[in-house]
Image (cartoon, grey):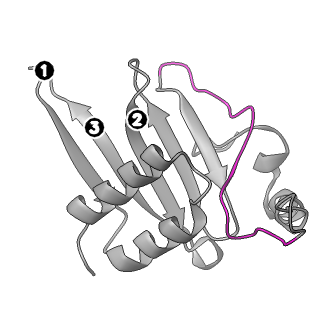
Amino acid sequence: MDPWGGPEGSFSSGEAALHFVFSNWNDGETGVKSKHMLKELKNVRQIAGERPRRWFVDEDIELILWYGEDRKLSGFQVCYDKKAGTRSVTWKRITEENGETHSVLLSDGPFNKDRVMALVKRDSENLEEEVRQFILQRLETLGTHA
């Protein structure tokens, strides 16, 4: 079992499976390899008691999206520097016991906001535009420069 609750199937069997996927991606129109374009994994394992999620991967980053009961985006995680020891930035909408809601952006250490935003901009052009802009706006307004 993947300790991070990753997708099941061939994708959880390590880099060999991911390498196969990346080396065989094709944009379907020009024949150009698309290693810097997020691809959505199908049949992502949903964990009981957790919010539904979507999972996207490419050679440099992974993007996980969580949705609330209202089907609105309630969180996301950008994992980057996959080849050098993965780093992550996570945004969540938190509801307190008193019903008050606020947002928080968490990082596993200082992060270079401009670099992370550039990676997301470059690799997420195929996402729904409202989702892409939502992520970029949260990174811009809540992120700090390292």
Whether residue 101 is situated above or below residue 139 in the rendered picture? above
Residue 55 shows in this picture:
yes
Q: Give the mark nearer the N terminus: 3 vs 2.
A: 2
User: Callout 2: 10 Å neighbours few (<14), some, many (20+)?
Assistant: some
Residue 34 lies in the magenta-colored region = yes
For residue 109: magenta?
no
**SS at mark 3?**
strand
- Type of amino acid at the residue the image marks with label 3: Arg
Image x and y of residue 113, in percent:
33, 74
Name the residue at 31% across, 74% down. Answer: 110
Real-space CA distance between mark 3 and mark 2, rounded to the nearest whole angstrom? 9 Å
In space, the residues marked 1 and 3 are separated at their CA atoms by 12 Å
The residue identified by callout 2 is 73
Q: Residues within 10 Å of mark 3 (few under 14, many from 20)?
A: some
> Mark 3 sits on what residue?
93
Q: Give coordinates of residue 114: x percent, y percent.
A: 36, 78
Name the image quarter holding residue 68: top left
Residue furthest to the front in view is: 29
What segment is highlighted magenta in the picture? 32-49
Q: Quadrant of residue 105?
A: bottom left
Q: Nearer the viewer, mark 1 or mark 2?
A: 2
Is residue 112 visible in this depiction of the protein? no
Label 3 with label 2: CB-CB less than 8 Å: no
User: Which residue is the site of mark 1?
Assistant: 99
Query: In the displayed structure, does residue 23 sit left or right of residue 137?
Result: right
